[in-house]
Image (spheres, helix red, strand yellow):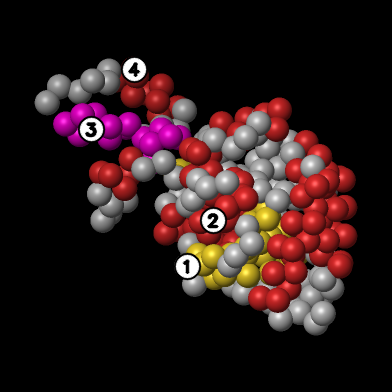
Amino acid sequence: MTSRWTERQREMLGAMGVRVFETPHAEVLTPDRPEPVEGQTRADRNTPVPAQPLRQAQGERVVQVAQTRSDIATLDWPALRAAVSECRACALCESRTQTVFGVGHERARLMIVGEAPGENEDRQGEPFVGQAGKLLDNMLRAIGLARDAATPEQGVFICNTLKCRPPRNRNPDPAETARCAPYLDRQIELVQPKLLLAMGRFAAQALLGSDEAIGKLRGRVHERRGVKVIVTYHPAYLLRTLADKARAWDDLCLAASVLELPS
């Protein structure tokens, strides 16, 4: 087979730290196409997954190497935080100020999942800040919980479906949600909560795989991979729609009953 690369092109690629592999289709290792791993099928190699950088020898450029879902499923908290902070799996990495990983007790009985970081979250690196965050903190305090509590019984872990802010606070794109899903899955596995509280339509869709409206999903207990799920409104929505605060309080009371919190 005649190579598609000239010797001069090979030298230039080598200088950039890119390795060339000759196959019937002359595959090239690039930041978006990692080197095949033994045992992987072609479908596995072509499936978009989150990426983290591989630090090469001094003097060579940093190459983004895709990390599989199974790799992410083995990460502990420090490694997961590092993977999220360095993720370049989708275009949101180009416009973010920083990633928003999550806060709270890492073994909390209640895990709150929001939708996507907003402007304040992107700037501070913490989910649910600003007026929406104050409302959430007040809601939690009303049932005896807090994001900074020292015990799993009184603490919560709070994160978002997406770890990066969509430009102009637009709605999350399904492809972006899919690429962030392994990170959220691993957070849930590490926390091992008794209850997931999905705040907002996109959080509910991500956790339950349902496209039903919140009005049809709230008011009852769902289940996701053995973990109970309750759906409620996002605090930012409640700031605009005061009439639904009473319904959100009902959802919070339902959560408290599932957690068997003292009344």
Do we see residue 56 in this rendering?
A: no
Q: Is residue 207 above or below residue 30?
A: below
Left-right relation of 82 to 3? right
Q: Which residue is mark 1?
A: 225
- Give the mark nearer the N terminus: 4 vs 2: 4
Q: Which residue is mark 2?
A: 207
Image depth: mark 3 or mark 2 in front: 2
Q: Which numbered marker is on residue 22?
A: 3
Residues at marks 1 and 3 touching, judged by CB atoms closer than 8 Å: no
Q: Quadrant of residue 170?
A: top right
Query: How many C-alpha atoms fall within 10 Å of the one at disc 3: few (<14), some, or many (≥20)?
Result: few
- Element carrying mark 3: loop
Do we see residue 132 in this rendering?
A: yes
Q: Quadrant of residue 25?
A: top left
The residue lying toward the viewer, choosing from 178 and 98, is 178
Q: Residue at x 57, y 52 (%)?
A: 216
- What separation in Å lies between label 3 and label 2 (alpha carbons)? 42 Å
Q: Check disc 4 and give the amino acid type.
A: Arg
- What separation in Å lies between label 1 and label 4 (alpha carbons)? 54 Å
Q: Is residue 201 above or below residue 189?
A: above
- Element carrying mark 2: helix
Q: Which residue is mark 4?
A: 8
- Give the mark nearer the N terminus: 1 vs 3: 3
- Give the mark nearer the N terminus: 3 vs 2: 3
